[in-house]
Amino acid sequence: MSFKAAGFKHDAQFTRVRLSKGRNLKEHRSDFILCVYQARPDVDLTEWDIQQVRAVYKRDEWRLQFVCRTTIDPEPPGDEVAGVDLGICNFAAVSFGGESVLYPGGALKEDEYYLTKKRAETDDSASREAKRLDRKRTARRTHFLHTLSKAIVEGCVERDVGTLVVGDLGGIREDDENGEARNWGDHGNLDLHGWAFDRFATLLDYKAEAEGIDVELVSERDTSKSCSACGHMDDNQRVERGLYVCEECDTVANADVNGAENIRQKVLPSLATDGGDRDNGWLAQPGVRLFDRSEGSFAPREQVVNREP
């Protein structure tokens, strides 16, 4: 059972807490449960801002869990910058400037299609089975987004990234310049409706903040059209969905990685146009991390073994 701020009164001096039975604590002073607790020697609850108290029955005894608010100000892992391009086929493409990683959304897409179809087969949308499928779909999506955001932040910490630049998809569902709803294709429109970009951005932001990484949202305008190596822009350079070829400098790149690198360069001087000379083979050969349901985590593609359903 959980008790929010209005449902408990804490007495740190005598290490006890008063839990309401559901009525106002002031008007019904006797309508509460008085609990005396013992905390670890290294825990002093007078130093914490308690937001919630939870009573949990575990191993034949009741335990109290105090949920507290605190302020953290960690040092950033380093001064490097990474860029993130969010999409449908590849949910996230990350550019670290010299290395890139793709996180396909195939597992999430499979869950969305399968569970949506199973729910449609139920006779009553308000039935117990329909609600169970809704909870399952939500839980799987939430776990995927939490795991993905954690994997990206861990990758940033390993590479001394202090700034994470994310393409802002705030207008992806908005109408086009003619006032009509944007058409992403039959499957694309269905994917877009179920994709939780805003939710993911929130998860990524607070996980990054806990590691001292600053997250910046930037416009994705022209990032898919421009060459991240030379800056040349042409609407026809994206020759197919996953391939980008620059006719100006002959750079061949994964289209999503090229977009992620352009996003990264939004807060950096362009190394391609300021006289710098660098190998750009990593643009065409990103690492791939697939979601393994059996482990509930992302792993390099070659380490994920296909299993019989």
Image (cartoon, helix red, strand yellow):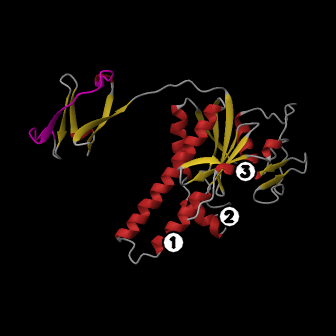
Please state which amino acid type lies under the numbered disc 1. Lys
Question: Which quadrant: the C terminus?
Answer: bottom right
| Labels 1 & 2 near each other (Cβ < 8 A) | no
Dot placed on the residue nearer the N-terminal end, 3 or 1: 1
Q: Residue at the spot x=54%, y=62% of the render?
A: 111
* Closer to us: 178 or 128: 128
Residue 84 circle label: none
Q: Nearer the viewer, mark 3 or mark 1?
A: 1
User: Does 10 sit above or below residue 303?
Assistant: above
Q: Residue at the spot x=72%, y=50% of the render?
A: 256
Residue 22 image offset from top left, x and y in percent: 18, 47
* Closer to us: 119 or 295: 295
| Labels 2 & 3 near each other (Cβ < 8 A) | no
Q: Is residue 176 magenta?
A: no
The residue indicated by pointer 2 is 178
Q: Residue at the spot x=42%, y=75% of the render?
A: 122
Q: CA distance from mark 1 to mark 2?
A: 33 Å
Q: Which residues are magenta?
A: 25-45
Residue 237 image offset from top left, x and y in percent: 84, 54
Q: CA distance from mark 2 to mark 3?
A: 26 Å
- At numbered mark 1, what does the secondary structure look like: helix, strand or loop? helix
Q: Residue at the spot x=33%, y=21% of the render?
A: 42
Q: CA distance from mark 3 to mark 1?
A: 29 Å
Residue 186 image offset from top left, x and y in percent: 64, 70
Residue 117 circle label: 1
The residue indicated by pointer 3 is 256
